Image: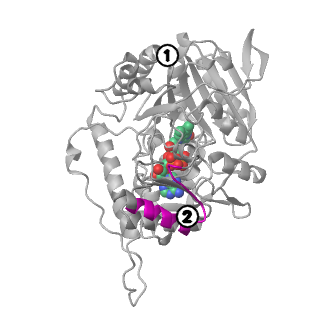
Amino acid sequence: MSGDGATRAIQVLAGAVSGRVIRPSEPEYDAARRVWNGMIDRKPLAVVRAAQVADVAPVIRLASQHGLALAVRGGGHNVAGNGTVDDGIVLDLGDLRRVEVDAVKGTVSVEPGVTLGDVDQATEPAGLVVPSGVVSGTGLVGLTLGGGFGWLIRPYGLTIDNLLSAEVVTADGSVHAASESDNPDLFWGLRGGGGNFGVVTSLTYRAQQLGPQVYAGNLFYGRAKWAEALAAYAEWTADLPDELTSIVSLLVPPPAWELGDDRLLIIGFSWAAPHRPEVDELIGRLRAAAAPDEEVIQPSRWVEWQSQADGLFPRGVRAYWKNVALDHLASDVIDAIVRHSESLPRGIAIDIHHMGGAFARVPEGATAFPDRSARYWLNLYSFWADAPDDDDHTADPGRARRPGAKRARRAVRELPGQRGNTDRRAAAGACRLRTNQARAAHRAEAAVRPPEPVPAQPQRPRRLSPPAAPADCGQPRKQAASLWARPSAPAIGTRHESPPRPQHSTVRQGDRHAHRSGIHPPRV
Ligand SMILES: Cc1cc2nc3c(=O)[nH]c(=O)nc-3n(C[C@H](O)[C@H](O)[C@H](O)COP(=O)(O)OP(=O)(O)OC[C@H]3O[C@@H](n4cnc5c(N)ncnc54)[C@H](O)[C@@H]3O)c2cc1C
């Protein structure tokens, strides 16, 4: 489209929506085009800040009529930068942040710009939660469309496993309800298939009872104990009740934590039920198998536990993340993790999420989310401050020059038991993922096709045959690694050190002093 044509189209748009249309000549443009990942530097023709849900359809129609690329943005946290676009239109839904809690029905409905923190704050008075992720500024709708996992994955599954219904505006500007009974194929695709089926204007979730307090904590291990702690963790996680979700982190703590400059292994957990002696016994079992150097375990407000890591993820940090699903945490995997963690540079960290529980009980094909059988997910995330370091931290092998990025990539590639890129199982996983994506697209497209003439007798919607697996599925190939299992998005995270100030106290633990910090290190 010519520059003049696009300019005219955007003028027309400005008259058709109630929200602001911000163009490159305007002073707010630079701030409006930015997303969370500072490495993403795209220049859209305009950013439309929707002021109401009714602004969505005119933007879609205009982009479609004029062949302009459209990026949809909620919380702006997509690490790959899918929330913005060069030479197209950004539909920014971030001002639409209404949350409706129905404590009687136990449901929560949200507008498309809500963050995880908005929802946690709104549900707290009713003692309810919507299972989501671990950094409160993340957009809930974007997170949901990719699956969504966090501290409640074992008791309640992914965020999509708690989704009841959606309202979606599709490419022709028409509005569709999606649920198990309305447009079920579209609903299937929305749950883990990414954001490509239309613009979601509302989601309704089944809320779970929890809080306002949660029993949670962290156990800290110095380098000498990593192998022992990981072996103990592997054994411990073989047999845990669903209420207990845990995440291992390997990171150099930021200076404000006052835990030194060495990389630490941290086992964090949260217990999604009222505190009972059982949980102390379970933690005691882990402690007995691998005594931590320090620990902080205490009841916390759920909203605080959920936002403990926020200060570590400031908007504008440069970020690149990878992840991989693991079948096991046996000694070969532990050796690889320990070996690589010892040599990773400061800005690269690892998380290992214990999966299973309710997450694993959802049948594989019930949603578009690709892999329910993974026992653990490993996230490797890199973060840095300066643009000249971009090449060194990104995964394009031709571009990475410094050993840090190469070591990080090798660390993921060489992990035994992973469904990554080295064995037949990985190839099957990658194929399943791509097949699921193709099926999601196919089903969603079918679901929103213009209606056919109404038959004389009402019929149940017929399921369409899904596309076959991609032709190259017999060949082992590299699995597209993605953050938190979002199938379509490149992945990896970044963590930047500007944490909140800790509140310190010193507590006696056994026969020595243990440092107690008000900060709980982050998980992502
Ligand atoms: C600091 C940080 C912490 C994170 N923590 C977690 C975590 O704990 N658990 C987890 O599962 N993930 C986590 N993520 C990943 C996050 O869930 C995804 O990056 C997600 O895409 C972010 O959604 P958003 O709305 O903030 O992003 P945006 O960039 O605004 O949106 C991302 C994409 O989602 C789609 N989308 C968003 N809104 C809509 C809509 N209304 N309609 C249609 N499509 C839409 C679009 O494709 C859009 O490009 C984290 C990411 C970051 C940066």
Rendered residue at 41%/88% (across/down): 457
Q: 96 or 49, which is in the foreground?
A: 49
Percent of width and height locating residue 455? 38, 87
The reply to whether residue 16 is in sight is: yes
Say whether residue 95 is left or right of residue 29: right
Give the answer, above or below, for where 114 lies relative to 184: above
Which mark is drawn over residue 227? 1
Which segment did they paint magenta? 5-25
Which mark is drawn over residue 313? none
Q: Quadrant of residue 256?
A: top right
Percent of width and height locating residue 332? 38, 21
Q: 315 or 357, which is in the foreground?
A: 315
Give the answer, above or below, for where 137 lies relative to 65: above
Rendered residue at 46%/43% (across/down): 81
Percent of width and height locating residue 507? 78, 16
Separation of marks 2 and 1 at Cα, in angstroms = 44 Å
Quarter of the N terminus within the rendering: bottom left
Label 2, on which residue? 165
**Residue 136 lies within the magenta run:** no
Inspect the image, locate mark 2, and give the three-letter code of the amino acid beneath it.
Answer: Ser
